[in-house]
């Protein structure tokens, strides 16, 4: 059988990026997905918004839901201060296998813990398994119908603290309408929409930033 899209993306990184240089890994993926083969990375345009929110929050502990090939994992980990940690959850083992190699190629494996499995099962284990008190930052980019249940789970497990920032991808395309309703109508969140475009396209999409008020 032939290669998969994630495997072809990994090949493009190995061919065009410099080992240990996260910026070149990000550029290699963006070039490949813009000019060769579209893929569901947050991408360069929404990536700039992710970068700016991250720099503002400067999290010591961060969580990503939905690793895919590790593009946003690399974008986040490259901006973390020394000693800060990113935990990323991926449901699909084939995606996780490629992501591990892309994260390692960028030289960021010491800052990232990639956990394979369903987020709904893993979130309640965060405290006991990884000694997490609470997360400073959460990037939601997995199944769009998991955004609400997993946000509620993070609340119920005491993994959010006053000021934790949630940043959700794809709130317009493919869309997360229930999530927008949830965070925009809840008195426990202060939300803001960042209008952008679906990765590598002219289709509208955006990121929703929500601050947990405790
Ligand atoms: O990673 C997963 C599931 S797949 C990735 C989700 N992401 C998307 O589906 C996604 C899709 C599109 C898109 C696709 C086709 C279009 F025509 C337009 C847009 C764009 C994106 O930016 C996306 O992020 C997972 C992780 C943990 C779990 O616990 C679990 O249950 C699942
Ligand atoms: Mg996405």
Image (spheres, rainbow, N blue to C red):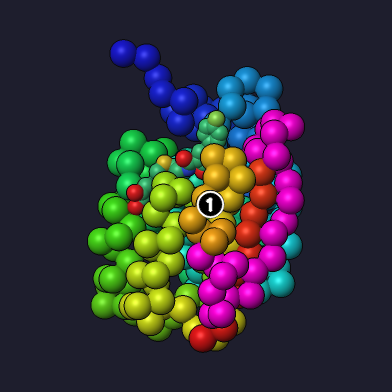
Q: Which residue bears the numbered disc 1?
A: 177
> Could you tell whether 146 is left or right of 162 in the image?
left
Looking at the image, residue 30 lies above or below residue 108: above
Q: Quadrant of the N terminus?
A: top left
Q: Position of residue 131 (x, y in %)?
A: 34, 79
SS for dot 1: helix
Assess mark 1: CB under 8 A from ligand 1? no
Looking at the image, residue 17 lies above or below residue 113: above
Magenta region, residue range: 182-204
The total of numbered circles placed on residues is 1
Residue situated in front as seen by the camera: 200 or 109: 200
Say which residue appears at 35% left-offset and 70% top-offset. Answer: 153
Looking at the image, residue 85 lies above or below residue 178: below
Q: Would you say residue 113 is visible in this rendering?
A: no
Q: Position of residue 97 (x, y in %)?
A: 36, 40
Say which residue appears at 65% left-offset and 37% top-offset. Answer: 199
For residue 131: magenta? no
Say which residue appears at 43% left-offset and 61% top-offset. Answer: 148
Residue situated in front as seen by the camera: 181 or 40: 181
Query: Is disc 1 surrounded by few (<14), some (14 to 19) or many (20+) residues within 10 Å?
Result: some
On the image, which quarter does residue 39 sit in?
top right
Looking at the image, residue 106 lies above or below residue 121: above
Q: Position of residue 190 (x, y in %)?
A: 63, 75
Say which residue appears at 38% left-offset and 63% top-offset. Answer: 150
Q: Would you say residue 162 is visible in this rendering?
A: yes
For residue 199: magenta? yes
On the image, which quarter does residue 203 sit in?
top right
Q: Position of residue 181 (x, y in %)?
A: 54, 61
Residue situated in front as seen by the camera: 186 or 204: 186
């Amino acid at each position: 059988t032939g290669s998969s899209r994630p495997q072809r993306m990994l090949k493009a990184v190995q061919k065009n990026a410099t080992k240990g240089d996260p910026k070149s890994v990000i550029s290699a993926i963006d070039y490949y997905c813009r000019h060769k083969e579209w893929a569901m990375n947050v991408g360069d345009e929404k990536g700039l918004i992710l970068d700016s929110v991250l720099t503002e929050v400067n999290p010591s502990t961060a969580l990503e839901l939905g690793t895919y090939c590790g593009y946003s994992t690399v974008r986040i980990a490259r901006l973390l201060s020394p000693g800060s940690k990113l935990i990323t959850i991926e449901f699909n083992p084939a995606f996780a296998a490629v992501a591990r190699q892309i994260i390692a190629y960028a030289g960021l494996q010491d800052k990232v813990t990639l956990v394979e499995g369903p987020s709904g099962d893993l979130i309640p284990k965060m405290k006991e398994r990884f000694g997490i008190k609470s997360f400073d930052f959460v990037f939601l980019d997995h199944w769009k119908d998991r955004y609400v249940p997993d946000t509620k789970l993070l609340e119920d497990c005491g993994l959010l603290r006053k000021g934790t920032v949630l940043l959700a991808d794809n709130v317009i395309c493919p869309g997360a309408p229930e999530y927008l309703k949830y965070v925009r109508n809840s008195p426990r969140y202060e939300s803001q929409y960042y209008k952008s475009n679906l990765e590598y396209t002219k289709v509208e999409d955006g990121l929703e930033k929500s601050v947990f008020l405790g």
